[in-house]
Image (tube, rainbow, N blue to C red):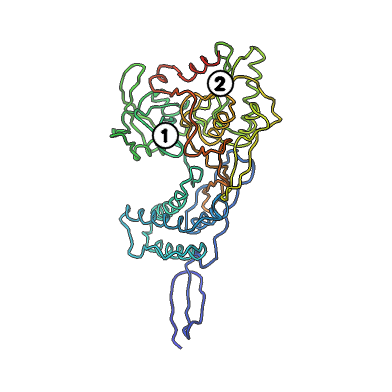
Amino acid sequence: MRNKLRIAVGVATTALVGGILTVVIVPAGSAESSSRPPACTAPTGQVGQPTTPAPPQPTTITTIGQAYYCIFDNYYSGPELDDRTLLVPAFAALTRELQRRGIDQPRATLPALTGRKDADWTAFSRTYDTIAAALPDDAAVRQAVAEATLLGMVSALDDNHARWTRGQQRSLLGMKFSGLRVDGVDPVVTAPIFVTTVAAGSGAASAGIKPGDEVVAVNGVPLILNGSVSEGVVRWLTTASPAQQITFTLHRPATDTTFTTTVTPVDFPQQSPKVDATLLPGDIAEVTIPGFTPGVADQVLNAIAELRETASVRGLILDMRGNGGGVGAELLRLLGAFVHGKPTSYWCDVRDKCTANHADDTVALVNLPLVVLTDRNCASACDSFASSVKDLHLGTLIGTRTAGMVSGPTLPYALDDNSELTLPSHREIGANRETVDIVGVAPDHLAPTTAVDLSAGRDAAVTKALALLR
């Protein structure tokens, strides 16, 4: 009997095939050493409450496998998903990372895939282990390759609510910009891109930057060139770290001056966005809602009630510009102040079985004429709120079309490198059963925020709202 020995580092298995004793030592952590990796874990505690993430650990093939099976188990279309739609883009992203680093490998070839998710994962992970074994002994390189692979897989879902995050995600500049959203560059962005907010105590505030300042260049590089936004410059804006000073060339419309200033990123204190209520001329209440955080609906309702204690409020403006969404229960509770007994939206599974969402009928109706201010950063639950207002004729929308980022309700899932995979469990459609995701909700009256108005302290949307409500 001839003995044939196939050697790798890991767990040994044996088989007698055709009179040949084959000893296979499977690489540790590969799919053959276990039928599938440990399951991703759902969060504990109250959904929507901020948590302190554990320090990131190295991302490995086990992590990638967790994400792979987590998608099948928890993503709304997982039951009908072809695994090749995940694995091919993941492998393509892996090879692109190898090429960018000048370390492409002859054996970095995608194995034949059959559409059987377990068998395909085994083949994919075995090939990944072979590639990883030949990588330079550099933790940063290995991490970059793993991240590229996992991001390629998640990006293949083409879903604005499916995302993978690991470690620090926020910029330390202390600014927000028109045309830049949580999902990247707004596809309808036009020049100029300008500063919309400056955080107190931030490096931007110390550098004298103000809302309305137009970005001419960053580190001497134009942000927009020939109508296209530079992705490299955007990365400077969104991932700035304390070790990286950034020089801005800005134009201030209010004074028609162009100047240069340097911002030192600092870990400025994060202040939880708060509901702000003001009584405007004509006894019109304006309430700013920065996000659908836990408890925000009652904060809004209490603010309206307090204004009514001292004035005969005749109309209500809800300013939801920049509202990035949040907890669905808060959305439904706030809608309960404006409508009872009607579906406000639907959540549907992959087979188009839909369940109606209803506003919280325990909330007393405010019985005020309503105007909602929207913009391209009104996303997720804010998209949904605007959609309900328009479909059910609850009020008037003023501003610009919403973000169109409302693919469905999500939950975050923990992976073994202390990263987080967020996946929608259903897809959402509006009260009239229309698709809001990607499309957004059009305003009844167009009133965009411009750099000129912001710099001068004017607000065209509020002006239009007051004209309608008086």
At horizontal 44% and vertical 17% (from top left) the residue drawn is: 458
In the image, is residue 73 above or below residue 382? Answer: below
Q: Quadrant of the C terminus?
A: top right
Name which quarter of the figure residue 126 lies in. Answer: bottom left
Of the residues shown, which amino acid type is indicated by label 2?
A: Ile
Q: Where residue 382 appears, x then y in whole percent?
A: 54, 32
Q: Nearer the viewer, mark 2 or mark 1?
A: 2
Identify residue for label 2: 317
Residue 64 location (% of width, % of height): 48, 56
Q: Position of residue 428 (x, y in %)?
A: 56, 41
Q: Are marks 2 and 1 in contact (CB under 8 Å)?
A: no
Left or right: 464 as drawn, with respect to 307: left
Residue 180: mark: 1
* Nearer-N-terminus badge (2/1): 1
Give the residue at x 51% y 37%: 436
Label 1: element kind: strand
**Callout 1 environment at 10 Å: few (<14), some (14 to 19), or many (20+)?**
some
Of the pair 404 and 50, the residue shown nearer to us: 404
